[in-house]
Structure formats: C-alpha cells, structure tokens
Amino acid sequence: MPRLLLALLLALTLSPALADQRSETQQQLEQTRQDIDELKKLQEQLDKERSSVQQQLRKTESEMGELEKQIRSLQNEMGTREKEIQRLDQEKKKLQSSRLEQQRLIAIQARAAYQSGRQEYLKLLLNQEQPEKLSRTLTYYGYLGSARAKQLDAFNTTLRQLAEVESSISGQQSQLTEQRSALDQRRSELAAVREERAQVLAKLNRDYASSESKLELRQAEQAELGRVLKRIEEEIARRAREEEEARQRALVEERRLREQLERQQREQERALASAPRQKAPKPQPLTLVSSGAGYGGPFAEARGQLPWPISGRLIARYGSPRGEDNRATWDGVLISASAGSPVRAIHDGRVVFADWLRGSGLLVILDHGNGYLSLYGHNQSLLKNAGDIVKAGEPIATVGTSGGQETPALYFAIRQQGRPTDPAQWCRAQG
C-alpha cells in the first residue's frame, strides 16, 4: 500500500513537468515547420524570380537577334541600291555625253543649212540647165534632211532616256534615305535592348553567384536541352515511321501495277498467238521510279571530313570541365569568333529547331538523317527557320553572345542517336 501511494505521488508531481516538456517540444516542431514553410516559399520565390529573369533574357536576346537580322537586311538592300545608283550615274554621264555630241552635230547641220540657204536649190529648179546636177543636188538635200531628222529623233530619245534615268536616281535616293533612317532607328532600338540585356544578365549573375547555384543552373540548362532534343528525336522518329509507311504503300502499289501490267502483257501475248499472221511486238521492260536519298548523302560517311562551322579558336573542348566545377562538362565545343561572323552548316540537312533556348541562346539544330543532329548555339541572329532545307556551307546564323555569354563564341555539338559525340572526330583537323 505505501508503494502504491508513493507511485501516485510521483505521478502527480511529474505530470506537470512532462506536460510542459511536451508543449515545448510541440512548439519547437511547429516553429521548425514554419521555418521550413518559409524556406520553401523563399525557394519558390527565388525560382520564380530566376524564371522571370530567364524569360527577360529570352525576350531581350530574341529581340536583339531580330534587330540584327533587320539591320543586316537593310544594309544589304542599301548596298544593292547604292550599286544601282552608281550604275544609273554612269548611264546618266553617257547620256549627257551623247546629248552634248548630238547638240554639236545638230548645230553644225543647222549652220550649214543656214549658210547654203535654199537659193541653189531654187535656181536649179527654175533654170533646169543641168538636169544631172539637179538630180545629184536633190539627192544630196534629201540625205541632209533625212540625217537631220534622224539626228533630232536620236536627240529626243536621249533627252527622254536622260529624264527617265534622273527620275530613277531620284527615286532610288529617296528610298535609300528612308532605309538609312530605318537603319538608324533599328540601331537605336538595338542599343536600348543591349543595355536592357546587360542589366538582366547582371541580375542573373548575381542570382547564380555560388558554385552550387551555377551547377544547378547548368544542370537545369542541360535538362532543358535534353527535353528539346527528345522532342525533336521523337518527331524525327514519327516522321521516319510515316515515310516508311508511305514507302511500303508505294511498294504495294508498285506490285499491284506490275501484276496488272503483267496480266495485260499475257493477254496481249495470247491475243497475238491466236493471230499468227501478225508479228508479235517485243515486250517493253517495266520502269519503276523510287525516291533518292535526301540531305546530300549519308552523314556517317563524312566522318573526319566535315568542315568546321566557323573559323576560330577552340576555347572549350568536348568533355572538358565547364568552369571551376568538374561535375559539369562540355557535351560539345565552344569556338571563339568575331560577333556577326557567318555560321555555316557542316552538312546538308533540314532545320528542326530555330529559336531561343535557356543556356544555349539563339539555337539552330539540323537533322542530317539516320539519327544525326548538329547544334549551333549562342548565335547573334538566326538566318533560317524550322523546316528549311540547307546545303553544306550555307550560312544559317551569325556568331553572338546569346544565352548569357559575355564574349562572342559558338557552341557546336553533334549528336548521334541522341548521344553527344566529340565534334573533333567528325570535322577536319585544323592547321
């Protein structure tokens, strides 16, 4: 009995302490949950801000690419128009020289006609003493009159052509002035967008200052590129299936036509056999047409012989570390080159992607058939659109700094069946 009373006393004494401890623990757990929730909210907000910065970067760099393209187009048009104005100026000088020469000849003829007058002609008509001289003189005067008429016609034609050329020059110069004004406006817009991009890039760099953040960013960029490539490969596979199905349908149709033609030939042969007096014609061989290989031949056969997309210095090799962290490596190469330099297709192909992508900037992806893709990133502007067919050596973009780069360089990669491969094994050795 005493033991039971002691136990009851101890329980009554410890209960408040245990309750206080449980309450304190509960408060700590609740505070921890709140801290975790705050951290989650902060992380979500940071991710949202980062996504917003990436969207701003995409917007500014896409605008820069479009403005660069417009500026290049205006410059090309202005160059063509200036050459046309030079050609018209040369033509104008020739017409002015012709006009002066024609004026001189007309003046000479006018003086000669004035000095000779019509007296000799009238005398010959009135006295008619020398018929043979009359005939020669009349012929002479006829020649002079015809020559003066032709000279005047040529002079009028020259004046008309000169007026047309001067009008064309005026029109070309007016259009050139408008293009120069448009070019200045585009350059001002480009300068403003470049300043906006610099601010966005500075904010992005501040957000990803730590090595861990940079690693996360690169991993996210690689994942983004991987998703795009997966979609492209799925689309290529779907198209290949459709082409194979179309080819199979064509083969079935060819067999049906062949069997039909063979039946017709057998029927003709039986008909000819029943008419022995007629000579049977020689059967004509069947001609079947099949589609040829596209994109300029197999990509795999060009291994080690492909040209590089640009001439420049290799500043990052395949498989080398990206920055200070060895956990991220290059799945292509980075080639330094002057901004605006043309980026050329390394092989015939079809454009399957031409747009801005996080980490790669303005990116072009070419499909070379049989699972081979080539990638060209960080461009200043894109010269081709998705679906375009390109030839080897054809310009497809220009070198730039899009995708967050600070110096002009080209990201160049080759994919084989979805796997990255070293471009140096495919392109010709330099130097």
Image (cartoon, helix red, strand yellow):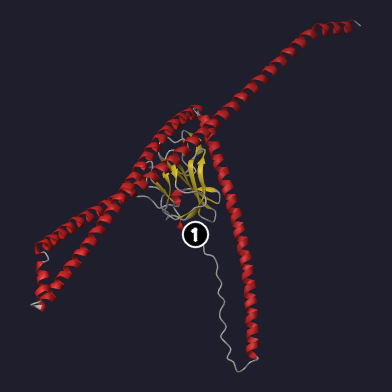
Residue 97 image offset from top left, x and y in percent: 19, 55
335 lies left or right of 365: left
Query: Who's the residue at 59% across and 55% down the image?
Result: 239
Residue identified by numbered label 1: 298
Q: Hey, which quadrant is residue 279 in on the image?
A: bottom right
Q: From this view, report whether residue 289 is shown above or below residue 174.
A: below
359 lies left or right of 245: left
Residue 243 image offset from top left, x and y in percent: 59, 59
For badge 1, the amino acid type reads Pro
Q: From this view, report whether residue 157 is shown above or below residue 198.
A: below
Disc 1 is placed on an element classified as loop
* Residue lying furthest bottom: 277
Q: From this view, report whether residue 35 is shown above or below residue 108.
A: above
Residue nearer the viewer, 173 or 264: 173
Confirm whether residue 402 shows in the render.
Answer: no
Q: Hey, which quadrant is residue 194 in on the image?
A: top left
308 lies left or right of 229: left
Residue nearer the viewer, 397 or 417: 397
> How many neighbours does mark 1 have within 10 angstroms: few (below 14), some (14-19), or many (20 or more)?
some
Which quadrant: the N terminus? top right
* Residue lying furthest right: 1
Residue 164 image offset from top left, x and y in percent: 30, 53
Residue nearer the viewer, 22 or 384: 384
